[in-house]
Image: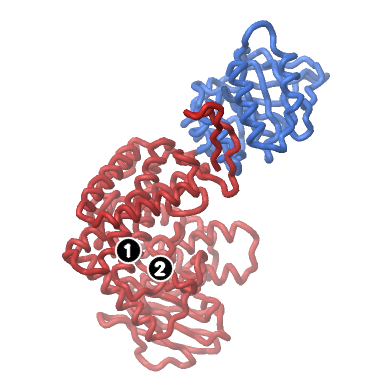
Amino acid sequence: MDRRPTLNEDVWIGAGGLTPEWRAVFSARTADTLARLRPAAAAARGRWSASLGYFLRQGGPERERLLGHPGLDYWLFLWENHFTQPRPEEDWHLHLGQFSGFAAALALARGDALECEASLDPNGRFPLFGTPYTLVYPLAQAKEPLHLRLLARQLDVEGPGGSRARLKADALGLRFTTPPTGPIRLEKSLELSGGIVIDDKSWLLLHGATMHGLASLDEKSLKRFQEVLATALREMRESDPEFHAELTDMLRLLIPLANPMKFGSVSSSYVNLRGAICLSHSEDALLQAETLIHEFSHQKMNQLLSVESVLKPGQSGQVFYSPWRKDARRLRGLLLGAHAFLNVCRYLLKRLSLRGFQKKEDVDVMLNIALRLPQIEMALRSLSFYADFTPFGERFLKGLWRELGLLTHGTLWFPRGVLRQAQTKTAGHRRRFALFDTGFHKNSGFIDRVDRAPFLTPGGREKTS
Amino acid sequence: MNLQARQDWLKAVRRSGPRLKLGRLQNELKKLDRHGEQEWEAGLCGVQPFEKIAFRVYNGTETQPPRGLIWDARNDRPVPARPAKKIRRQLRPFAPASLLDPALIRAFSDFIALCPVRGMITESVAEKKGWRQIGWSLPLSSPLPWPLFARLDIAAPFTADSCRLSFLLLDRRVTELVFRDAELWVYFR
């Protein structure tokens, strides 16, 4: 029996909010995560079996939420990749000890009894994943073991050098009931609404963010990072409550990135860190919203792709022109790009209409939209030319085309100059990097030496490069 | 492709890769041309820098070795043919599971889902101890245009030069994948 949820492409192209289908796809993901955890629990012996065994035995919404945490995604990624080779004993202790951060967070939320071992990370920290709280020890005590005892939302910690701490969780949060013995701090990360944590220190969470440099922000800068993002999310809730609901349901973690070249924005997300978005700071809330929507759209697609392949497998030839890049891409990349930029354009058009189209700076937003639409069209054209889709995928592609058509209507009143400028720029990019009018990428240095038949001019020849 | 199309294509190949030596190829091909016009297929080997080109008569039967040659365009000479031994070709149904390696099974299962094949042709040579397989091939049920072949995982050996090859092959259609001496060849017309 096919247990995959029935899918409505409209929900995945734009947004449908927290529908039963959204929940069903999320549940399919968490069921897969649970299935991947079981072999780890079977392999964990002795001191490490308590936390994994406890976690697997539970059910309920708290565990469901933790199963969707990006940290657990990455923990499993390391388990399935790093630990397939012989590794030093200390790697195992660190990895299994870090898992106790999930188990302890779950026990605290539920008020359960749990006694287990744990490990400080290489920075001397023990995050309670899924909460904004981290226990912080001196760096010299990195990777040292901890012993945890939890009962009725109280956490007792025995750490290196005989240090002890007792903490209690309640409606106000987590705090020490008495001052700890030993140099232990309880750090609380900044959060956004919906429990989205801003984290720039947890080793496990940052380990997988490899594409860009991480930012090291001081307290004031972190606060500003939070404030602008909070504004972006508030405006998103006003403009597109369904998209906002999906984003804040899935997103758990924001990681600040450095932006040394002073681009408008630097951002990334990872298939093994689902629910985490990495992005640089900007004072422009609309730009931050655009970045969040772009990266969340990728995450949403990856969530969809875990239950529905959309493209039939076997089509990963990296030969296609991408209107957003200089190098060749795969069909999947074009699909994700078209989807993400469609959602960005949809949001930007909504914000433009709310702001009344009066402000001068809106011209920049119009130019952004005007640039994206022909880029999306080029990507969809290549997908239509070359790709084989599943039955859902074919409906999905048609829906993307239709959405593009509707957005194009939304630009009818844009100044002609804006549209012309965008068309010139996209045409120039295509001339440089596409193989003429095909969807293929043109290698750098490619020279067309083949003579064509003379056209109009007798005896003439035509060559291009 | 007919003889004229073959000549036009060779012109394009010559221009696309100035270092390719094809001076003596035409004469060699003429030796193989029989009475009247024949239909030819060309083949490219997926080993960079793509300096081996094959030509063959394509309307042979599966059990008859195709007549043709392989040209070494680096050294301007034919690749030496195998010594004349008894060669057996057999067409049988293709089951990816027969490849044993899980990665290969997955890759070829995906391939035939996108691009059905007529079966698998094995080529074996007679030796004292019996038949030894020297190659195998997958003739496609329907020829596949090159641009649609290039997107496939199985076309990975050609990805690095996809731009030049696309320019050469235009919308020519792939008819068979041949695996010989650890090399992948694609034949097209």
Specify the quadrant that holds the N terminus of chain A. Answer: top left
Q: Colour of chain B?
A: blue
Q: Is residue A13 left or right of residue B102?
A: left
What is the x, y in percent for residue B86?
Answer: 77, 14
Looking at the image, residue A166 lies above or below residue A294: below
Looking at the image, residue A290 lies above or below residue A376: below
Query: Nearest the camera: B127 or A402?
Result: A402
Residue at x-position 57% and y-position 22%? B189
Label 1 close to label 2 by CB (< 8 Å): yes
Mark positioned earlier in the residue sequence (1 or 2)? 2
- Chain that bears disc 2: A
What is the x, y in percent for residue B38?
Answer: 62, 11
Residue at x-position 34% and y-position 35%? A391
- Chain that bears disc 1: A
For label 2, the SS is loop
Q: Is residue A244 left or right of residue A428?
A: left
Q: Which chain is red?
A: A
Residue at x-position 45% and y-position 72%? A262
Rounded to the nearest whole Å, what is the CA distance between mark 1 and mark 2?
Answer: 10 Å
Q: Residues within 10 Å of mark 2 (few under 14, many from 20)?
A: some
Q: Residues within 10 Å of mark 1 (few under 14, many from 20)?
A: many
Residue that label 2 marks = A265
Residue that label 1 marks = A290
Residue at x-position 32% and y-position 59%? A368
Specify the quadrant that holds the C terminus of chain A. Answer: top right
Query: Nearest the camera: A454 or A281?
Result: A454
